[in-house]
Amino acid sequence: MNKRQPDLTVLMERVHKPHNFSAILRSCDAVGVLEAHAIPAKHGIPNLEEAEDLSLKGKTFNETSGSAAKWVGLQLHADTASAFAHLKARGFQVLAAHFSERAVDYRQADYTRPTCILLGTEKWGVSPEAAELADAHILIPMVGMVQSLNVSVAAAVILFEAQRQRLQAGFYEQVRLAPEQYEAVLQSWMARHAQGQG
């Protein structure tokens, strides 16, 4: 609880493969993300109804998450525009993991600012709408024959760079949650544990 980062998050834009979705949540938990965001896929899992139900129950989409979904909140959005509006209203910069002419090395971004990392669907990546709305595009340099990493692997690489920068800045040495939020999250975690989910 004391190391949760309320101003670091991810937005999964129609990531539909359960193992990828769950692996991203696991990486979020590992670096202290308090809450993740998702625009559910129109087809496949997770879809809107199932994602809402599973997040409320604190269950994961796949066992590969190591029960991370119990400890990382999941906020769902109906579409890309509403997701961006929600994040922008809360002061987040949105960095799209997206190959484009304006993309920069992911290590050049400043993750000590309130930051959302945008991850696109497995086959097509970030949508044109999301790419246009994003504040910046970041990429992971590749020197092999393949052009990109699996979306969950890319998420982990970027999140741990964010963690590295925040560790250097001392973000993990102080409680980042407001007292009311801290108490609310703590009570939620305790309730889940009491229900046999811990």
Image: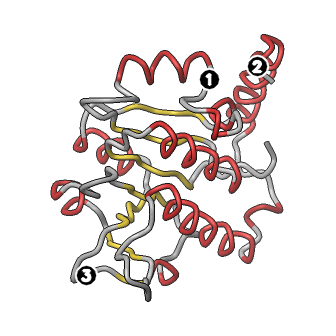
* Residue 160 percent across, percent down from the top left: 63, 67
Q: Give the vertical position of 185 relative to 68 (above or below).
A: above
Question: Reading the chain from its start, which is encountered first: label 2 or label 3?
Answer: 3
- Which of 65 and 144 lies nearest the eye of the viewer? 144
Q: Residue at x 38, y 60 (%)?
A: 94
- Residue 165 or residue 101, whichever sits in front: 101
Real-space Cα separation, disc 2 to disc 3, in angstroms: 44 Å
Q: Position of residue 70 (x, y in %)?
A: 67, 29
Q: What is the number of the mark on residue 12?
A: none
Three-letter code for the amino acid on which mark 2 is drawn? Gln
Question: Residue at the front extreme?
Answer: 145
- Between discs 2 and 1, the one toward the N terminus: 1
Residue 24 picture location, percent across and down:
54, 49
Q: Which residue is mark 2?
A: 197
Secondary structure of the residue carrying numbered label 1: loop
Q: How is the image coloured?
A: secondary structure
Q: CA distance from mark 2 to mark 1?
A: 8 Å
Q: Earlier in the sequence, mark 1 or mark 3?
A: 1
Name the residue tied to disc 1. Answer: 59
Label 1: few (<14), some (14–19) or many (≥20) C-alpha neighbours in 10 Å: some
What's the mark number on residue 102? 3
The residue that appears at 46% across and 77% down in the rendered structure is 106
